[in-house]
């Protein structure tokens, strides 16, 4: 039986923590769809197309992974793509309450869709896209937290004039 999982997120930008979850999820499921959310309310640094491209470059070596953009309800996207599982990451206990609420609502809206939580590898438990952007914005070194293409893109976004 083929199992497809959707790993949704804004991925603004994709981090090594995201990549770690995708790589480990790819061993558990036949197909992983990294679903990059078009969520303008979050005012992302990178456009949807940029986020899709960066995630694609960071995850290109993983054969059973597909990166696509989506808008609207996650459960509708998952249904259209034939996914049975939503893959989510939990970095800390503080993530749990929100993630549990989302999982419960998704299960209520679509009982056939299960949510699976993975904890990131220990070296990524503190890494978030927000922190990466904040460090990069102030000229800090984020090379240990993102793919080289993402590092280059962050440098371009935050290049200081002069």
Image (tube, rainbow, N blue to C red):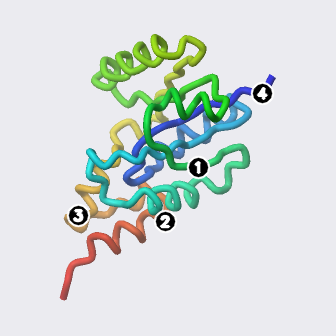
Q: Residue at x 45, y 42 (%)?
A: 71
Left or right: 112, with 160 as reference point: right
Asked if 107 appears above or below 63 in the picture, the reply is above
Using the numbered discs, state the Cα–Cα distance from disc 1 to disc 4 in whole angstroms.
Answer: 18 Å
Residue at numbered disc 3: 137
Asked if 7 appears above or below 62 in the picture, the reply is above
Residue at numbered disc 4: 2
Q: SS of the residue at dot 3?
A: helix
Residue 4, by quadrant, is: top right
Q: Residues within 10 Å of mark 3 (few under 14, many from 20)?
A: some
Residue at numbered disc 1: 67
Using the numbered discs, state the Cα–Cα distance from disc 4 to disc 3 in whole angstroms.
Answer: 42 Å
Q: Residues within 10 Å of mark 4 (few under 14, many from 20)?
A: few
Q: Position of residue 10 (x, y in %)?
A: 40, 45
Q: SS of the residue at dot 1?
A: strand
Left or right: 77, with 12 as reference point: right
For the residues bearing labels 1 and 4, Cβ distance under 8 angstroms:
no
Q: Position of residue 45 (x, y in %)?
A: 30, 59
For the residues bearing labels 1 and 2, Cβ distance under 8 angstroms:
no
Residue at numbered disc 2: 148
Q: Which mark is residue 120?
A: none
Q: SS of the residue at dot 4?
A: loop
Q: Residue at x 47, y 15 (%)?
A: 109
Using the numbered discs, state the Cα–Cα distance from disc 3 to disc 2 in whole angstroms.
Answer: 16 Å
Using the numbered discs, state the Cα–Cα distance from disc 1 to disc 2 in whole angstroms.
Answer: 18 Å
Q: SS of the residue at dot 2?
A: helix
Q: Position of residue 152 (x, y in %)?
A: 42, 71
Counting residues from the N terminus, which is met first, the one under dot 3 or under dot 2?
Answer: 3
């Amino acid at each position: 039986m083929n199992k497809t999982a959707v790993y949704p997120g804004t991925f603004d930008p994709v981090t090594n923590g995201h990549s770690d979850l995708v790589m480990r999820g790819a061993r558990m499921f036949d197909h992983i769809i990294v679903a990059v959310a078009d969520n303008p309310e979050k005012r992302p640094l990178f456009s949807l197309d940029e986020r899709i491209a960066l995630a694609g470059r960071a995850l290109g070596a993983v054969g059973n992974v597909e990166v696509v953009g989506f808008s609207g309800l996650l459960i509708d996207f998952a249904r259209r793509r034939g996914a049975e599982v939503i893959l989510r990451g939990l970095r800390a206990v503080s993530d749990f309450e929100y993630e549990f609420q989302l999982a419960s609502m998704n299960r209520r809206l679509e009982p056939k869709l299960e949510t699976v939580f993975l904890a990131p590898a220990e070296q990524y438990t503190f890494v978030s896209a927000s922190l990466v952007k904040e460090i990069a914005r102030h000229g800090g070194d984020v090379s240990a937290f993102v793919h080289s293409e993402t590092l280059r893109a962050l440098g371009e976004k935050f290049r200081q004039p002069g």
